[in-house]
Image (tube, helix red, strand yellow):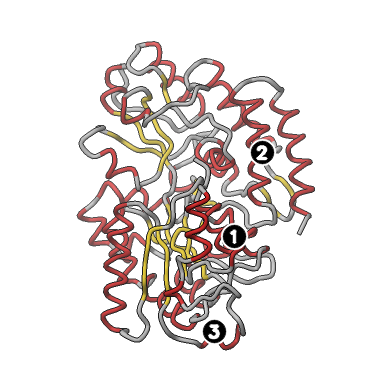
Amino acid sequence: MKLQAGLLAVVLAGSLAACGSGGGGAGDADAAAQARGPITIWYSNNAEEVAWGKQMVAAWNAEHADQKVTAQEIPTGKSSEEVIGAAITAGNAPCLIFNTSPASVSQFQKQGGLVPLDASYIEERSGDVAQQYKSADGKYYQLPWKSNPVMIFYNKKIFAKAGITDPSLKTYDEFLAASRKVVASKAAKFAIYPAPSNEFYQSWFDFYPLYAAETGGKQLVADGKATFASDEGKKVAQFWRTMYADKLASPEKYTGDAFVDGTAAMAVVGPWAIATYKGKVDWGVVPVPTSSGKAPEEIHTFSDAKNVAMYSACKNRGTASDVLKFATSKEQDGKFLAATGQMPLRKDVASTYADYFAKNPEYKTFADQSSRTVEVPNVPNSITIWQTFRDAYSKSVIFGQEDIGTALDGAAQKVDQLAKQS
């Protein structure tokens, strides 16, 4: 739904009085960087994340009576990106948002809405994966926080009904063969049901995970140039075109969860969904397929990350910086993992939280996969680039109205121009 005028007024006029953030902006940045006092933060409205956020804030406030954190769920709107963008424009965004999409960082940065963060802390916490989140000026305007590495969930009962008891889904040919069995046996109406709608982010859950796997970890844009019109990109697109052309996936929008409902035998999703599927689906999980059937330890996938950013309206940035590090400490990351099942974007998750994974083995595969994730490229016009790609993908792959090669080549030319613009 569209962001309503009343909500916008709340976001713009009053949500951050407690943050020490005035409508006129942060004032002197050097003074703000050292200043300490009350701040406000936003976090996701996901129930498990809200529970984690409340205990984190309570733990901080218990030890810092003069630097109280006031927390709230991110206000409702068409998207969190729209809400955050509106707050930046008004000059009263919160100090920290624990729900910042990496795809939006370049735009928020262009708006002057973000504060550069402590690079040494980020790189020490996250290791090599941090480099994907660095901006063009060499600074970090987002802390890599948590990921949901995307894999293929499959419904064991549906597969068994189709006569598949030990599914092999490593190659495109194997995946297609299993999909045809599922549909031909009427065990499920469709093999898989990625959202066929045209929002810019939908390609993160069909094309992009398979592209990351096929290319060994390439991003959609690298060195200022589109990469997706390559042979690998066209192979991935053709695989999905076959899924749609053979009616193994549907071009119709689905209301609800097709995997939970049994309408689809598989889903492309990350570990956040495990709690959702509990008691509803007897599931298994495998890495996304590749044309050649790469070994699991070679597979890269989309990270589906959400990060933490500090916003320039914040006056008490010294406190905000301390809260950021407190909230992403080893202890708090462990509590976040336990509460949500989502993977902290830090080095050696599997060994750092070995006790958790021993008690919750269904999450261990995702911990391993989390070390090989690919993020959306941190480039100018990121969302416009993704929308340009999605338009071409929808037309050629989902609806078959244009040749795949022609569509991807044309989109790549547009993306190259967009990536050059500041």
Give the percent coordinates (x, y) of residue 324.
43, 73
Image point (59%, 75%), residue name: 25
Label drawn at residue 389? 2
Is the residue under label 3 in contact with that under label 2 (CB below 8 Å)?
no
Q: Is residue 380 above or below residue 239?
A: below
* Amino acid at circle 2: Phe
Q: Secondary structure at mark 3?
A: helix
Which label lies toward us, 2 or 1?
1
N-terminal of the pair, mark 2 or mark 3, is: 3
Mark 2 Cα-neighbour bin, 10 Å: few <14, some 14–19, many ≥20: many
Image point (79%, 48%), residue name: 417
N-terminal of the pair, mark 3 or mark 1, is: 3
N-terminal of the pair, mark 2 or mark 1, is: 1
Image point (28%, 38%), residue name: 277
Give the percent coordinates (x, y) of residue 245.
56, 17
**Circle 1 sits on which residue?**
105
Image check: 120 left or right of 181?
right
Give the percent coordinates (x, y) of residue 50.
32, 58
Is the residue under label 1 in contact with that under label 3 (CB below 8 Å)?
no
**Circle 3 sits on which residue?**
33
Which label lies toward us, 2 or 3?
3
Instruction: Give me the C-alpha separation between circle 3 and circle 1.
Output: 20 Å
Image point (51%, 58%), residue name: 9
Image check: 347 left or right of 61?
right
Any part of residue 300 in sight:
no
Name the foreground residue: 109 vs 142: 109
Mark 1 Cα-neighbour bin, 10 Å: few <14, some 14–19, many ≥20: many
Instruction: Give me the C-alpha separation between circle 2 and circle 3.
Output: 39 Å
Quarter holding the C terminus is: bottom right
